[in-house]
Image: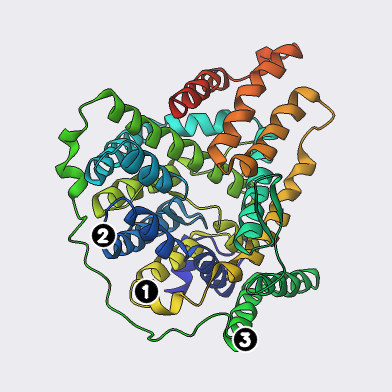
Amino acid sequence: MKEKVASYFHIKELETNFGREILAGFTTFISMAYILFVNPSVLGASGMDKGAVFTATALASALGCLLMGLLARYPIATAPALGINAFFTYSVCIGMKVPWQTALAGVFVASLIFLLITIFKLRELIIDAIPANLKYAISAGIGLFIAFIGLADGGLIIADKSTLVKLGSFSGTTWLTIFGLIVTAILLVKHVPGGIFIGMIATSLLGIITGMIKLPTALISPAPSLAPTFLVAAKHIGDINSMQLIVVVLTFLLVTFFDTAGTLVGLAQQAGFLRNNKMPRVGKALMSDSVAMTAGSLLGTSPVGAYVESSAGIAVGGRSGLTAVVTGLLFIVGMFFSPLLAVVTSQVTAPALIIVGVLMAQSMKKIEWEKMEIAIPSFLILLGMPLTYSISDGLALGVIAYPITMIAAKRGKEVHPIMYLLFFVFIGFFWILNK
């Protein structure tokens, strides 16, 4: 049995082992387990039942991870995406006064379109058309983005009206982040296997010992009922009957499309999966997140997509689909151990995100910086992702600039036709978002 599993996941060919893959799965799960609590909080503000959203989040995440691991055989985890869930609640439901039931129907329609364009391999064509230099920039840009998230979550940088951001106060739980960062950095410098995961455990223990992290009052609790949100999306498709709601559906589609595309490319680059600038089995990976997004909308959650936190598992050696399978199974278990997950605070995961950012930023060295037609769009992607707090927005800035700089350098014929098409798509994308 063990040999069959090893053969299916190509354990030997990928130069990994069961222990490393399981550790990577745990690391990825711990890095993104916060979504189990953040998503219900965000979507709950729209009027949705938080308990139902918690269960829907766990099940949709588990399904996406299992499909990604078993079908596409990649160590990439999926879950309801941050950012688009805020758009769902604050822009659509609160800003436009659209009932959450209708907004959820919009996610369902967008997911069906997603499935169609995945089946016809349109998403695959787009990912393959992105030039290698921009793929390096996407990987590094995601690294800067998640490091920025880690610095903010850990309290090392905070918002400021005068300077936008500034150094945070070294007090309270921020010291947990600093401790975790130092411990994890030392472990990685000394090449200790599982250094990121060990750093998380050490930070959690320090938090419990010092009282900065409260011990859970219970270990196990029943999973909340799905009844308030289950199949609501399908029942309200008829509510999408105005141009405003059609724009909402298109926004869900575009943001999730390019967020996932950018994330998949970046993670594939980090793990060394790209071959001749192409990602093997990318069609199966895209189908996995498309099905998860469709199922998620029916269960009762905002769009599901590939998660940048998968880079934490990849960083500790995860290379096969077994990593994603382990993460998916842990999401199912997590439904019943929700009190225990509260121990893993943002200060615990922050050091891991910062360190992973360092690892992913290394792909910057592969960009042809001496060629300005390449350097400018690459730089816009690198800077755009963290500063716009959006993978898709940062990607859009670089994709819009790329044809312009290439034409200026008299290299317009080298630009793939799809990149010219994306130029106009992203301009329309920005126009829709800013209407």
Q: Position of residue 231 (x, y in %)?
A: 18, 51
How many dots with numbers? 3
Which residue is at 69% across, 39% downward? 382
Which comes sooner in the sequence, label 3 or label 2? 2
Left or right placement of residue 356 versus residue 241 in this view:
right
Q: Amino acid at mark 3?
A: Thr
Mark 2 to mark 1: distance in Å? 21 Å
Q: Position of residue 230 (x, y in %)?
A: 20, 55
Residue placed most toward the observer, 169 or 267: 169
Q: Which residue is mark 1?
A: 333
Q: Where is the C terminus found, in terms of image quarters? A: top left
Which comes sooner in the sequence, label 1 or label 3? 3
Q: Which residue is mark 2?
A: 49
Residue placed most toward the observer, 324 or 95: 95
Give the SS element for disc 3. Answer: helix
Left or right placement of residue 174 versus residue 125 in this view:
right
Give the SS element for disc 1. Answer: helix
Label 2 crowding class (10 Å Cα cut-off): few <14, some 14-19, many 20+? many
Q: Which residue is mark 3?
A: 210
Q: Position of residue 192 (x, y in %)?
A: 73, 75
Specify the label residue 252 is tagged with: none
Q: Amino acid at mark 1?
A: Val
Q: Name the quadrant containing residue 110.
A: top left
Q: Name the quadrant containing residue 225.
A: bottom left
369 shown above or below 408: below
Residue at the extreme bottom: 209
Mark 3 to mark 2: distance in Å? 34 Å
7 shown above or below 90: below
Scheme of image coloration: rainbow
256 shown above or below 173: above
